[in-house]
Image (tube, grey):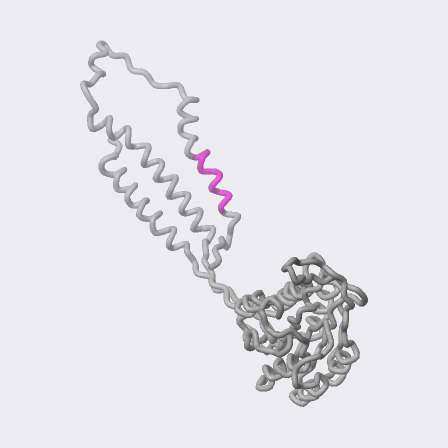
Amino acid sequence: MIFRFASPWILILLLLLPLVAAWPYLMKRAARPAALRYADIKLTSSGGKTPRSWRMMVRPLLNLARLLIAALVIIALARPQTGQAREITTGEGVDIALAVDISGSMASLDFQPQNRLEAAKQVISDFVQERPYDQMGLVVFANSAFDQSPPTVDHNVLLRLLDRVQLATDLKIEDGTAIGMGLANAGSMLKDSQAKSKVLILLTDGVNNAGQIDPVTAAEAAKALGIKVYTIGMGRPGQVPVPVTDVFGREQVVYQESALDEATLQKIADVTGGRYFRAEDTNGLKQIYDEINSLEKSEVEIQNFTRYQELAGVVLAPALLLLLGEMALRQTIFRKIP
């Protein structure tokens, strides 16, 4: 709901009303008061309030009513309006499947101040919010893959499900990195899509060491379905800090070698006509998703319309009633007799 004045400059006239209200009193003070000499002051006194004195007390309210009428007329002349905004979308977005690695190595702390998985979730969340017209689904994978969110245009639901994603070790499921399974499950989400552009974004920090499907074989299947795959290798090369729990239940940080099969990720991207990216920190990961966002533009045209309804009549109605009432009182109860 939108409220506005079509001619707001007219409201400046409201500033004159205090001057109009004060003008009679200013003139009265400037003028010399009239006087009448009485033979006996008792003749001018009364034992109580007469009807005439009551009318004299109430008469200023009629002046106040005139000011209120003038204010309502000024507001009506400014044309108050309410409007309903409508957005018409034509064309279509891109159907996107997101595949995210949740293996134990995604707990590595080289994406400070968060671990790899939390950094990925934040960047993906921003990516989703920047593409409101695309249908998106989410797959997570460790030793096996499963659907976290089916393809949907309700991104609020998708974001809630993304926020619930946890490491395989926290979920107490078998650890591993089944890249082929993650790729196959995400591709299956898009197999029935009628969109002109179908995109799969796969993020991992490891080497395929689980699952029954070879990553390159899954890439060939994605290509047959017309799916373009962007692969993202996550993690700094060399030794990276990783939190581990010892046999006594104490958590400590140790340094482990970061293993990433870049050759396979590059092959997946090449087979499907996509691109491979390497992210070594959170800022780099964000830049990668920003670049994918610019590469895969949604063919959507948005037109905004606002239909306004005039409210001047709503304001003038009470003004007219006040005017009629004020005129009737001045011609009857408060009528001045020459």
Q: Is residue 16 magenta?
A: yes
x and y, in percent, of residue 94 in the image: 62, 77
Front position in the image: 76 or 218: 218
x and y, in percent, of residue 16 in the image: 47, 38
How many numbered callouts?
A: 0
Up-down relation of residue 36 to residue 206 (above or below): above
Up-down relation of residue 39 to residue 165 (above or below): above
- The residue shown at (70%, 88%) is 217
Front position in the image: 85 or 269: 269
Front position in the image: 48 or 286: 286
Please identify the residue farthest to the left as the structure is shown.
47
Please identify the residue farthest to the top as the structure is shown.
39
Q: Is residue 247 left or right of residue 310?
A: right
- The residue shown at (29%, 45%) is 324
- The residue shown at (76%, 65%) is 256
Give the extent of the magenta segment.
Answer: 11-20
Please identify the residue farthest to the right as the structure is shown.
238
x and y, in percent, of residue 101 in the image: 66, 72
Q: Is residue 42 left or right of residue 237?
A: left
User: Where is residue 112, by image quadrant?
Assistant: bottom right
User: Where is residue 269, by image quadrant?
Assistant: bottom right
User: Where is residue 160, by image quadrant?
Assistant: bottom right
Q: Is residue 10 left or right of residue 277?
A: left
